[in-house]
Amino acid sequence: MIHELLLALSGYPGTIFTWNKRNGLQVSQDLPFLHPSESSVLNRLCKMGTDYVRFTEFIEQHTGHVHQQEHYSSQPSQTGLHGIYLRAFCTGLHSMLQPYRQALLDLEKEFLGDPHLSISHVNYMLEQFQLLFPSVMVVVETIKSQKIHGCQILETVYKHSCGGLPPVRMALEKILAVCHGVMYKQLAAWMLHGLLLDQSEEFFAKQGPSVGGATAAQEEEEEDLGIGGLSGKQLRELQDLRLIEEENMLAPSLQQFSLRVEMLPSYIPVRVAEKILFVGESVQMFENHNQSPSRAGSILKHQEDMFAAELHRLKQQPLFSLVDFENLVDGIRSTVAEVLLLDDDNLLPLLHLTIDYQGKDSKEASGNREGTTPPQETSPREAPPTGWAALGLAYKVQWPLHILFTPAVLEKYNVVFRYLLSVRRVQSELQHCWALQMQRKHLKSNQTDAVKWRLRNHMAFLVDNLQYYLQVDVLESQFSQLLHQINATRDFESIRLAHDHFLSNLLAQSFILLKPVFHCLNEILELCHNFCSLVSQNLGPLDERGAAQLDILVKGFSRQSFLLFKILSSVRNHQINSDLAQLLLRLDYNKYYTQAGGTLGSFGL
């Protein structure tokens, strides 16, 4: 009977120990010579043998390494489980079963030497597996029932290996080490060669943008802060220094990659995964950019063999060490980041003007025409941009600067460009009006002329100080800080963060994100433009109609200048007051603005 028992525990049942698809191995019920205590021990051994058979079924189904016996096979249909991590798990499981097979072989040898071996001896020799197999079976059943896939298998095995039973922990750590071998091979291909070898979508890096979106809890409320219509959302926008990264569609060869967070094991922090993503993406882009074979691999300074050896060393370690792992990732990342620094090439030929064409019959064609930009959707109340407002800048992004200048970033630069262009254009028009005034200063003037030229002086005063603030306090200051940060680092990723910070500050300090101030400034610029048009079209004294138009402009400019002064003065006690206070300082450096009650343009001043 011992021989029959050993065969059954090896996965070959017979007449004494039978196989049932539902209950597994069982002791035959029609054996009168068995004592109830012996039956109890045999049933415990049969439970262990059943787990072994289930293990071999699982391995055979997903790897084909083990010959499957027809008399106990459940012949399952396709379960949907697949992938290289699953095969690695099966390989580790197969290795874990080797001591069990060896124990059965040793018992067989003992039985041949001593036919009087007892069932208790068999039970004693296999006792460790009666504790191990049920715990490992829980892992197998979890993978099967929850359809665990890819790197999620690492997480599942890791969690079950954190128990307090040493045999279970050691066995699962060995299985995990085998699974880590697959991860290290994918890491080597990705970080050293820029190859994402992941046909079954098992790795925690993927091609394409991140799918995650903003949750309802992250939505901003539009509460009014009592600052001239400034809402809480707009206030937080000024303080938000993160730019939204959109899908990079610059060229087919420059693919965007992102993290597949659900595949990332919990013992690998997101910060490390982001470094891995950065390295692989940079290497991949470098390989695509360099057509010459002689330059291939130069981004790693020909240290691929050394890094590959380090990855292999980590792969051979029985336990995963986050410290060693992150140190190696940091080493590769530092090497890659040093190669990506900005060149001092002449960028002017890469820039050209575009026109945002909004023709009804040619919307599709305009998006494909060089020198134009795709039509932007406008609200029913918002007229499509025309004339100067339709001008924009297009930049032909060169590798590796496309990491910095994504389509979303370029669009933000266009917003800043259009705003600065409108300020400079109005300033030039006001200066032209001053030239016209100088040409006619020898002629006799009337009361209307005094109002007209006083209004021009006030408009020029406001616009000149606005332009000086934008040029000196915003652009030159922020650009100087950006250059300092670029020159102080050899890390391209740090440069990217500094650039994001730079662009966010431009949008915030120029008040583009602060709608009340931005709207007020645009109204003032529009009034100045209308005034310059009126003066240019009426070189002589104004007639009754021109005087009426001038009166409307005086009142409009007085109203908007008062509103601007009120907004600038009302935010002194808020976090964003530094930018507005600086503009107010430029406008009211001698307290003239304050003494005028915050109103410019009226004849009484």
Image (cartoon, rainbow, N blue to C red):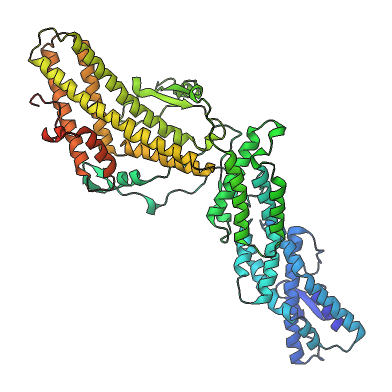
In the image, 255 versus 472, the foreground residue is 472
Q: Residue at x 49, y 39 (%)?
A: 487
The quadrant of the rendering that contains the N terminus is bottom right
Quarter of the image with the C terminus in it:
top left
Residue located at (29% from left, 28% from top): 467
Relative image position of residue 492 (x, y in whole percent): 53, 41
Q: In the displayed structure, would residue 275 be above or below residue 291?
A: below
Give the camera-side residue of 45 and 214.
214
Residue 385 placement, left or right of 230? right
Number of numbered discs on residues: 0
Above or below: residue 78 compared with residue 98: above
**Position of 445 relative to 232 (above/below):** above
Q: Quadrant of residue 234?
A: top left
In the rendered structure, the answer to whether residue 492 lies left or right of residue 558 reads right
Q: Residue furthest right?
A: 113
The residue drawn where x is 28% and y is 34% is: 518
Taking 524 as reference, is 416 left or right? right
Q: Answer above or below: position of 603 versus 310.
A: above
Residue 82 seen in the current view: no
Q: Position of residue 215 (x, y in %)?
A: 42, 52
Visible residue check, residue 473:
yes
Q: Position of residue 483 (x, y in %)?
A: 45, 37
Q: Nearer the viewer, residue 604 or 48?
A: 604
Q: Quadrant of residue 51?
A: bottom right
